[in-house]
Amino acid sequence: MRLHLLAHAATAASRAARFPVDEPIDAGGRRAASELRPAAPEHLWCAPSARCRETAALVLPGRAVDGEAPAGPDPGVWAGRSPADLAAEDPAALQAWLTDPSAAPPGGESLAALLARVGAWMDELPGGEDRTVGLAVVDPPVIRAAVAHALGAGAAAAWRVDVAPLTLAVLTGRSGRWNLRSLGSGPTGEPGS
């Protein structure tokens, strides 16, 4: 299988480096997403957030979604907040989240839990002898987790993967054996940010 993971287009929260809220993509994100024209995949999966659904509709207009891709991590009470605000308010909690993959924002999901959830989804994707191509429109942390899973690098390595809006990751393989083929700009070759 060849799995393409496309990060959603920019939102107000992503441009301001805040934890995400379920919001639509912004005008610049809509423009950039509508300019992408990837080859039609055999399967299209989309995370449930408004930003991912809107990106998928702009990138592949009229294409029905085949199923749900993993949602981004739940930021809990940190939704809409910036790391700078959190560092001033509760530096110990932010530091724990940044350094301990099992730490989670209050009411949210840990990086370790995200990696396990994304890895399980990847390993359940259809495999076989035929070369299947699938595209999943997801949140940037899902791409980080997928790359860490593919490389067998562990949850802490996910922090070391930069994923801007409309970044495209291409993974090949199947359950238990994934490889990173590429990570970079979107399907048209334009920069991912």
Image (spheres, rainbow, N blue to C red):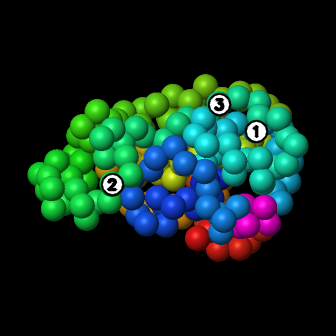
Q: Which mark is residue 68?
A: 3
Pick the quarter of the image with the N terminus. top right
Query: Residue 187 bears which disc, if any?
Result: none
SS of the residue under disc 2: loop
Circle nearer the N terminus (3, 1) = 1
- Kind of residue at disc 2: Arg
Q: How far apart, in angstroms, are the residues tagged by discs 3 and 2? A: 27 Å
The answer to if 37 sits in the magenta stretch is no
Amino acid type, mark 3: Glu
Q: Is residue 173 left or right of residue 109?
A: right
Instruction: Decide: few, some or many residues near mark 3? Use Cα within 10 Å; few <14, some 14-19, many ≥20.
Output: some
Q: Based on the displayed image, in which of its 4 quarters is residue 7 positioned?
A: bottom right
Residue that appears at 70% across and 36% down: 45
In the image, the segment drawn in magenta is: 31-36
Q: Secondary structure at mark 1?
A: strand
Instruction: Report the front residue among 178 and 189.
Output: 189
Q: Where's the C terminus, which quadrant?
A: bottom right
Q: Residue at x 70, y 29 (%)?
A: 67
Q: Toward the viewer: 115 or 61?
A: 61
The residue where tag 1 is placed is: 44
Spatial CA span between label 3 and label 1: 9 Å
What's the CA distance linking mark 2 and mark 1? 31 Å
Q: In this figure, which residue is indicated by the disc labeled 2?
A: 81
